[in-house]
Image (cartoon, rainbow, N blue to C red):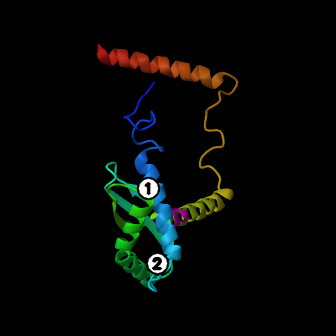
């Protein structure tokens, strides 16, 4: 049986049930609740907390968020989160009861933008496939429909055998 470190419940480090992952989930909940109820900064746009990741030593936490809106709203939200970091960290410390509250940093989550880019690329590939299929519909193969030679009543095959024997004899004569 695979035993992890003491206190990990028998799980190897890095699995979904580790203390850092559980703390990250709890921090994401606390931050989302605070943004919804307690932080009243007018620069704060329509924010969604997507994830919080905590380092293995539980000293640093990165909170990932998305903002629905223009680039100005995204910049305003980043400034509002930066100014509220101390208040959010103190609330995380109160609610988690840790000896050392992790330092919190905010990072805009790029997953939605990446997903949108991938969807655009898939749409372009589908359009290119449709264009190729449209060109292919009326196309015919180049050359004969049957590219293989078929012997006619055995006559052609006999002539080829005689030609091959003559070529072999000429090669033998040249070698001597």
Eye-nearest disc, 2 or 1? 2
Q: Quadrant of the N terminus?
A: top left
Looking at the image, do the residues carrying marks 2 and 1 touch, with CB atoms under 8 Å apart? no
Q: Residue at x 42, y 67 (%)?
A: 91
Circle 2 packing at 10 Å, graded few (<14), some (14-19), many (20+), is: some
- Going from the N terminus, do you reach mark 2 or mark 1 first? 1
Callout 1: few (<14), some (14-19), or many (20+) C-alpha neighbours within 10 Å? many
x and y, in percent, of residue 53 in the image: 40, 56
Numbered disc 2: secondary structure:
loop
Q: CA distance from mark 2 to mark 1?
A: 20 Å
Q: SS at mark 1?
A: helix
Please identify the residue farthest to the top as the structure is shown: 176
Residue 170 is situated, as x and y percent measured from the top left of the image, at 39, 19
Point 60% across, 46% down: residue: 143
Q: Quadrant of residue 171?
A: top left
Q: Tell whether 160 sits left or right of 23.
A: right
Q: What residue sits right under mark 2 in the picture?
A: 39
Instruction: Give the overall secondary structure of the magenta segment.
Output: helix
Q: Residue 116 colored magenta?
A: yes
Query: Relative to the observer, which residue lies in front, 46 or 100?
Result: 100
Magenta-highlighted residues: 114-119
Q: Where residue 55 is drawn, which disc sits there?
A: none
Q: Compared to 96, does 168 lie above or below?
A: above
**Residue at the outermost bottom position:** 42
* Res. 34 visible in picture: yes
Residue 24's label in the rendered image is: 1
């Amino acid at each position: 049986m695979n035993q992890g470190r003491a206190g990990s419940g028998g799980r190897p480090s890095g699995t979904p049930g580790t203390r850092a992952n559980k703390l990250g989930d709890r921090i994401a909940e606390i931050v989302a609740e605070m943004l919804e109820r307690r932080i009243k900064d007018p620069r704060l746009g329509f924010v969604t907390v997507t994830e919080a990741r905590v380092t293995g030593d539980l000293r640093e936490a990165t909170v990932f968020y998305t903002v629905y809106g223009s680039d100005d709203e995204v910049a305003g939200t980043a400034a509002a989160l930066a100014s509220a970091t101390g208040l959010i960290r103190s609330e995380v410390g109160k609610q988690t009861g840790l000896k050392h509250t992790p330092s919190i940093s905010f990072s805009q989550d790029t997953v939605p933008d990446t997903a949108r880019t991938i969807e655009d690329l898939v749409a372009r590939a589908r359009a290119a496939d449709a264009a190729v299929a449209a060109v292919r519909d009326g196309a015919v193969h180049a050359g004969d429909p049957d590219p293989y030679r078929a012997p006619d009543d055995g006559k052609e095959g006999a002539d080829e055998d005689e030609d091959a024997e003559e070529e072999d004899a000429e090669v033998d004569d040249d070698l001597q």
